[in-house]
Image (cartoon, helix red, strand yellow):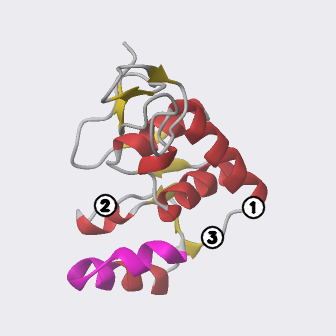
């Protein structure tokens, strides 16, 4: 079973697997990609809404990897759907792949190369240079902006 992100519809992804998506993906699509979504829905694609518990589980995992701030609500619910249905997530989004990896959710990439390894991001202050494990709007020490950074 494949859970399709908007990139699957944009890139005209095809598969022989059973396909699933979420209603929020349709809202992101325009033009021919929206027609593909509608056509697949009419020909048997299942629309799924993940449980609040699994959405929370994905948010926790995204917070741990440092990806929460870059994921949309749609992204989080797609990962939760793949997790809940024990399905493969079809996406080119690196942050989604990173969180899916943290949750042991299989990923299929479409037009981009997939990630090589799962990362846990840090946040570095642009003023004083201090590093934090969790995202804050501003540095709690000096008040400067924080930037997401690969800890390696």
Which quadrant of the figure contains the N terminus? Answer: bottom right
The residue at the point 46 percent across, 48 percent down is: 69
Alpha carbon distance from label 1 to label 2:
24 Å
In percent of width and height, residue 22 lies at 54, 71
Tell me, yes or no, if residue 139 can be seen here.
Answer: yes
First reached walking from the N terminus: tag 1 or tag 2: 2
* Camera-side residue of 151 and 36: 151
Q: Residue furthest front?
A: 142
First reached walking from the N terminus: tag 2 or tag 3: 2
Q: Which residue is mark 3?
A: 48
The residue at the point 35 percent across, 22 percent down is: 128
User: What SS does tag 1 mark?
Assistant: helix
Of tags 1 and 2, the one toward the viewer is 1
In percent of width and height, residue 57 lies at 70, 45
Asked if the residues shown at circle 2 and circle 3 are in contact, with their CB atoms under 8 angstroms apart, the answer is: no
In percent of width and height, residue 61 lies at 62, 38
Q: Which residues are magenta?
A: 23-36
Q: Viewed as shown, does residue 30 lie left or right of 118?
A: left
In the drawing, what numbered circle is on residue 52? 1
In the drawing, what numbered circle is on residue 7? 2
Where 67 falls versus 125 (above or below)?
A: below
Q: Quadrant of residue 9?
A: bottom left
User: What SS does tag 3 mark?
Assistant: loop
Of tags 3 and 1, the one toward the viewer is 1
């Amino acid at each position: 079973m494949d859970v399709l992100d908007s990139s699957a519809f944009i890139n005209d992804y095809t598969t022989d697997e059973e396909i699933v998506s979420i209603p929020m993906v349709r809202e992101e699509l325009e033009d021919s990609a929206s027609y593909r979504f509608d056509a697949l829905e009419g020909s048997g694609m299942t629309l799924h809404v993940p449980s609040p518990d699994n959405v929370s589980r994905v948010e926790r995992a995204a917070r741990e990897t440092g990806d929460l701030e870059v994921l949309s609500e749609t992204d989080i619910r797609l990962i939760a759907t793949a997790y809940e249905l024990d399905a493969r997530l079809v996406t080119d989004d690196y942050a989604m792949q990173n969180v899916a990896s943290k949750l042991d959710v299989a990923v299929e990439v479409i037009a981009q190369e997939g990630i090589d390894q799962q990362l846990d991001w840090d946040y570095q202050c642009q003023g004083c240079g201090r590093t934090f494990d969790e995202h804050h709007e501003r540095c709690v020490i000096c008040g400067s902006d924080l930037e997401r950074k690969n800890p390696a």
